[in-house]
């Protein structure tokens, strides 16, 4: 969430930058500033009223001591009237602050100055690519390979739950487990603390990282307990530091977690969502970093390089994309997507997003730190997929298929215990 100070000090710049995201903020910002003026006016009156109450309370005590009963009673009555006025103003203040909060959460994060204008993925900017794209003849897509080698059962998933909930079997299940272990080992070696968080979160956690109220339609909701199934480990892991004040020396805070992830993906259908391309439940290893504001873009670059190294270990052709304003999330200031090439589908598949949210999440979380002057400041938060499993598995199966089975990348063999699937 942005701060009122940001909006008041840089109104024109905020409006211009949010236009990069395709968001017209002028009217909302005008309403917010008007409500903030009302809030300040009510607070000023309330402060004056309370000061008058304190003054009269002292005078009443003196009058009683002096035996001036009539004047003391009048002063006491005046104090009662002021308290009633205070209650009305406090209620007015609560209502104004509620309206102000409702308007503030409608504003997306301000995109970084490097983010280009654009509306769709076609307007994104390729930063670099690596690996070699190999042209395969008569290559089978991963859903056919999964059936051929009996490693992923999509039909059984439909029976047990519904479409988008595949069942991994035999070497398919071991491949999943191997990738999770490999990703976590690489992350912890790089200094990320491994966390095993809950996969259900409360409303406050959903609000803290920006999923609520923006994305509630895409989340599975356990209504009886008012819990949400997590769309990513980012939500519980980042919320560990909700309502926490850190010392400057505590940074950077680096965490990693594997969790199943749940997304309703309402409205998703067609050939591009077949097989593992888009699921309602999938596994993902996440990295999260809390940073000092002045270091957060160095942290972002470091995280991008870290994810790139993991993909290199998997020996997959990849490219790194800097998202344009129209393709960015509500909460992000700058996002890099990683895509791997699918040899059978002959297209790029997104497998990771690495983002800097600057202070946007921290303001919602009330995640702060004490600077050298002992004043509290908002921290910066970042996160990235390292990595999401479904499309990684799809690319591994498709790109490494041979007449004699599916080859496993060398480093991954240490975790699978086998060199090929056949």
Image: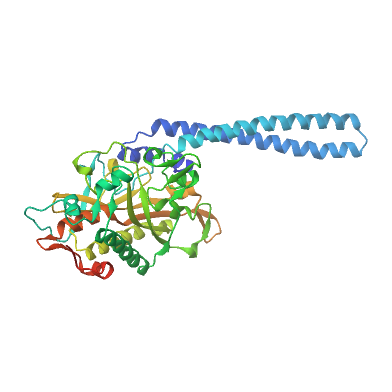
Q: Quick check: can you spot residue 318?
A: no
Query: Which part of the image, by quadrant, shows the C terminus?
Result: bottom left
Q: Identify the residue at horizontal 20%, vertical 43% (top origin).
A: 272
Q: Identify the residue at horizontal 22%, vertical 63% (top origin).
A: 314
Residue nearest the observer in this picture, 99 or 298: 99
Q: Quick check: can you spot residue 327?
A: yes
Residue nearest the observer in this picture, 40 or 253: 253
Q: What x and y, as percent, mark residue 259?
A: 38, 55
Q: How many marks?
A: 0
Q: Identify the residue at horizontal 73%, vertical 31% (top origin).
A: 82
Q: What x and y, as percent, mark residue 412?
A: 25, 67
Determine the residue located farthest toward the right in the rendered image: 67
Residue nearest the observer in this picture, 172 or 259: 172
Splitting the image into 4 quarters, where does residue 80 fall? top right
Q: What x and y, as percent, mark residue 235?
A: 42, 50
Q: Identify the residue at horizontal 51%, vertical 42% (top origin).
A: 225
Splitting the image into 4 quarters, where does residue 216 fall? top left
Q: What x and y, as percent, mark residue 104?
A: 46, 38
Is 131 left, or right, of 288 in this rendering? left
């Amino acid at each position: 969430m942005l701060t009122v100070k940001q909006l008041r000090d840089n109104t024109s710049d905020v409006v211009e930058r949010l236009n990069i995201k395709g968001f017209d903020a002028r009217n909302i910002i005008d309403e917010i500033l008007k409500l903030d003026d009302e809030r300040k006016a009510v607070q000023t009156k309330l402060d004056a009223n309370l000061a008058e109450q304190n003054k009269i309370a002292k005078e009443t005590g003196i009058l009683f001591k002096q035996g001036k009963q009539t004047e003391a009673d009048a002063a006491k009555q005046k104090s009662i009237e002021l308290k009633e006025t205070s209650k009305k103003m406090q209620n007015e203040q609560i209502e104004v602050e509620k309206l102000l909060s409702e308007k503030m959460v409608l504003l997306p994060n301000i995109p970084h100055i490097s983010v280009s204008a654009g509306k769709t993925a076609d307007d994104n900017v390729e930063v670099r690519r690596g690996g070699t794209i190999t042209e395969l003849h008569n290559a089978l897509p991963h859903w056919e390979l999964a059936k051929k080698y009996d490693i992923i059962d999509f039909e059984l998933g439909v029976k047990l739950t519904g479409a988008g909930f595949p069942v991994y079997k035999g070497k398919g299940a071991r491949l999943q487990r191997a990738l999770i272990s490999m990703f976590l080992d690489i992350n912890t070696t790089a200094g990320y603390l491994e966390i095993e968080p809950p996969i259900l979160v409360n409303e406050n956690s959903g609000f803290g990282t920006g999923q609520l109220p923006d994305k509630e339609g895409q989340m599975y909701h356990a209504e009886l307990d008012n819990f949400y199934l997590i769309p990513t480990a980012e939500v519980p892991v980042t919320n560990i530091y909700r309502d926490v004040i850190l010392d400057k020396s505590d940074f950077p805070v680096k965490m990693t977690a594997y969790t199943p992830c749940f997304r309703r993906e309402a409205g998703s259908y067609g050939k591009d969502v077949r097989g593992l391309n888009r699921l309602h439940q999938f596994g993902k290893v996440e990295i999260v970093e809390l940073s000092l504001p002045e270091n957060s873009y160095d942290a972002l670059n470091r995280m991008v390089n870290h994810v790139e190294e993991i993909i290199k270990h998997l020996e997959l052709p990849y490219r790194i994309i800097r998202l344009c304003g129209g393709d960015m999330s509500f909460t992000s200031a700058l996002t890099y997507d990683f895509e791997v090439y699918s040899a059978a589908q002959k297209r790029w598949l997104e497998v990771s997003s690495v983002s800097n949210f600057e202070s946007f999440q921290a303001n919602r979380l009330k995640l702060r730190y004490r600077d050298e002057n002992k004043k509290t400041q908002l921290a910066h938060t970042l996160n990235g997929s390292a990595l999401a499993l479904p499309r990684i598995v799809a690319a591994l199966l498709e790109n490494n298929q041979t007449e004699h089975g599916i080859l496993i990348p060398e480093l991954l063999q240490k975790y699978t215990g086998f060199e090929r699937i056949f």
